[in-house]
Image: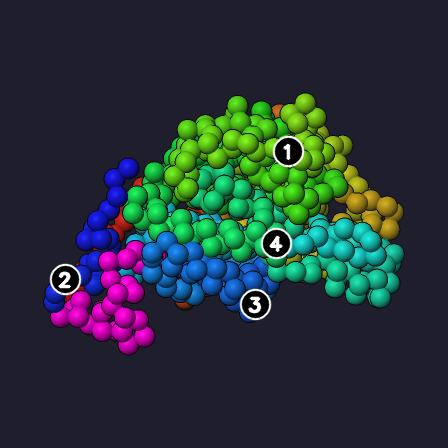
């Protein structure tokens, strides 16, 4: 393997020439307290850390950055930590999805504008993984992803709780009057009790698993619990390995290929991934020039069994159980005949080499192909006159009786309107109704918030119902479950067919046929479309204005049009004068 010379390091452009500008760079490093022998002729590694005091998923990242630095120094590199935008799903409103592309832009430009020879990306909470990876793919320097890891299992009165999933479950019981104030407070304190991302197979664990399967993390790093000492060791190893990647010039374009993206999609289906995987994986793939589509994902979903028995698609287990059952390496070993094992990964080895020796230690958590949780993968893509550009559903996480369903629509134009109605016990609604929330997509939300798991109307909750068909152009949390059709494209806000649906119209879902239709004739739809008026723009300035002008629809990943690879070449190295 060819090894770079120190003079070939990217950082040498900043530090090596004997001119006034390099004198200034070296003097400023000395101003920071570093002697020239500490940074000269060494790989300069940027640690992009999404820690913040408002991001509980990353609460341990201050300490983990120290572990990364330790590894970089052990391998002969020079470490520099920079704060990055910390977009968390808990506190960032209306949704962190509104800012995923901001993180991607920041990541790309931070890497390009600084003298980094390689980067360690520290993320985990839902949008941080795709945001960091999208930017780093475009920037093109060697990179390795350090996943935050799942939090510990929730616990209340001896029950294991899953963040998000059990919150929805117990909220329904609270609305039905079955949970006291004291019990509600106890659940709040027990459901999330350590640093780390949601310990269900929600969006966070889905996206770190996808990044792992794509070859961008150390093998199996995605499932290590955040507070396990193994997570500290993995962090230090990320530091050591990125230095080696720089000398080997192991850049993302050698790792993120059509084959590795396909591997990631197959693994996503086998894990019971979040529906959010669709918009993020498509966006990540397209940054690498891989034209992944909804139809590609649906085709893989039809033939990939779900074998990770982890909530919400699974029944009994959480990410901590998954890790100790063998983790992602063990799951991939179970489906290795479906994967392209020659794909290169960040440790310099092939995927096949990384899977050698992987074992399943609990075959109820990671099921054999002969006993899957669900016979197909996690996601299905629907088409029809309600969603000509596609919509997604998670079949394994909803009651099978809704796989083929026909009922009258109950349409809401905003979340406040919906929320007020479903808490009205006089609402005229039956279990056969189809709840519809629109104007909640990429532009309508704005940002496509996680509003797609519409609450069951209180009147039906009290009758014992816990699921019904729901449709939206929004997303839903990866920790959610139920018969929810999401990401309807085009969204209602831009005049998609969902904007033409009226309360009382009959909606038909045929999951085996992958169809979602409103039973309204074409002539009537044409009349409605002619009468439709576009809503007022959400923003007149700032980030929201820029976002609204350039974000694409859900079926193409919600990236900015000008950031996609086919828009034009990325900028080259910055001028240094």
Q: List the residue tagged with mark 2.
A: 17
Mark 2: few/some/many CA within 10 Å (<14, 14-19, 20+): few
C-alpha separation, residue under disc 4 versus residue under disc 2: 45 Å
Work out whether mark 3 precedes mark 4 in sequence or the reverse, and give the earlier one.
Answer: 3
Q: CA distance from mark 3 to mark 4?
A: 22 Å
Quadrant housing the C terminus? bottom left
Viewer-proximal residue among 275 and 183: 183
- Badge 1 density bin: few <14, some 14–19, many ≥20, Cα 10 Å: many
Residue 120: % across, % down: 41, 54
Mark 2 element type: loop
Q: Sequence order check: which comes first, mark 4 or mark 1? A: 4
Label 3 with label 1: CB-CB less than 8 Å? no
- Can you identify the residue that label 3 sits on? 54
**Quick check: marks 3 and 4 in contact, CB under 8 Å?**
no
| Quarter of the image where one finds residue 173 | bottom right
Tell me where residue 181 appears, x and y as whole percent.
84, 66
Which secondary structure class fits the magenta region best?
helix
Q: Earlier in the sequence, mark 2 or mark 1?
A: 2
Q: In the rendered image, which residue does mark 4 sit on?
A: 228
Pointer 2 with pointer 1, Cβ within 8 A: no
Q: Earlier in the sequence, mark 3 or mark 1?
A: 3
Colour approach in the figure: rainbow
Q: Which residue is mark 1?
A: 360
């Amino acid at each position: 393997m060819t090894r770079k010379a120190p003079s070939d390091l990217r950082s040498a452009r900043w530090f090596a020439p004997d001119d006034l500008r390099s004198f200034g760079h070296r003097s400023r490093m000395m101003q920071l307290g570093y002697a020239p022998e500490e940074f000269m002729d060494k790989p300069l590694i940027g640690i992009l850390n999404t820690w913040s005091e408002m991001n509980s998923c990353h609460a341990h990242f201050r300490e983990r950055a120290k572990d990364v630095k330790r590894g970089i120094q052990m391998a002969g590199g020079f470490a520099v930590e920079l704060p990055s935008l910390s977009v968390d799903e808990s506190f960032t409103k209306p949704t962190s999805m509104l800012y995923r592309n901001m993180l991607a832009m920041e990541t790309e430009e931070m890497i390009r504008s600084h003298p980094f020879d390689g980067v360690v990306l520290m993320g985990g909470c839902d949008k941080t993984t795709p945001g960091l990876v999208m930017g780093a793919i475009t920037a093109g320097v060697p990179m390795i992803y350090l996943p935050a890891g799942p939090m510990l299992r929730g616990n209340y009165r001896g029950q294991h709780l899953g963040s998000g999933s059990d919150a929805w479950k117990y909220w329904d019981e609270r609305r039905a009057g079955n949970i006291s104030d004291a019990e509600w407070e106890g659940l709040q304190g027990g459901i999330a009790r350590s640093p780390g991302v949601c310990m269900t197979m929600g969006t966070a664990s889905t996206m770190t698993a996808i990044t792992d399967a794509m070859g961008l993390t150390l093998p199996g790093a995605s499932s290590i619990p955040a507070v396990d000492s193994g997570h500290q060791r993995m962090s230090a190893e990320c530091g050591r390995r990125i230095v080696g990647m720089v000398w080997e010039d192991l850049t993302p374009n050698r790792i993120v290929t059509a084959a590795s993206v396909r591997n990631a999609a197959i693994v996503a289906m086998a894990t019971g991934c979040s529906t959010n995987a669709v918009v993020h994986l498509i966006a990540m793939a397209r940054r690498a020039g891989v034209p992944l589509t909804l139809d590609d994902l649906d085709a893989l979903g039809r033939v990939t069994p779900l074998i990770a028995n982890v909530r919400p698609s699974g029944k009994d287990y959480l990410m901590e159980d998954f890790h100790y059952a063998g983790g992602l390496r063990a799951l991939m070993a179970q489906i290795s005949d479906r994967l392209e094992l020659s794909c290169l990964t960040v440790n310099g080895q092939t995927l096949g080499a990384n899977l050698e020796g992987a074992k399943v230690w609990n075959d109820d958590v990671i099921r054999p192909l002969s006993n899957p949780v669900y016979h197909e993968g996690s996601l299905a893509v629907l088409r029809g006159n309600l969603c000509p550009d596609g919509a997604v559903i998670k079949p394994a996480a909803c009651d099978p009786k809704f796989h083929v369903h026909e009922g009258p629509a109950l349409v809401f134009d905003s979340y406040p309107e919906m929320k007020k109605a479903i808490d009205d016990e006089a609402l005229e609604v039956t279990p056969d109704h189809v709840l519809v929330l629109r104007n909640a997509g990429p532009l309508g939300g704005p940002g496509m918030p996680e509003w797609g798991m519409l609450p069951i109307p209180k009147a039906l909750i009290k009758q014992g119902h816990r699921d019904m068909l729901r449709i939206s152009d929004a997303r839903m949390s990866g920790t959610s479950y139920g018969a929810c059709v999401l990401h309807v494209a085009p969204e209602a806000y831009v005049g998609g067919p969902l904007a033409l649906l009226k309360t009382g119209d009959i909606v038909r879902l045929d999951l085996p046929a992958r169809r979602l239709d409103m039973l309204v004739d074409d002539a009537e739809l044409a009349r409605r479309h002619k009468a439709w008026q576009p809503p007022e723009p959400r923003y007149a300035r700032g980030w929201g204005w820029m976002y609204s002008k350039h974000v694409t629809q859900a079926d193409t990943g919600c990236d900015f049009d000008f950031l996609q690879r086919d828009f034009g070449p990325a900028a080259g190295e910055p001028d240094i004068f």
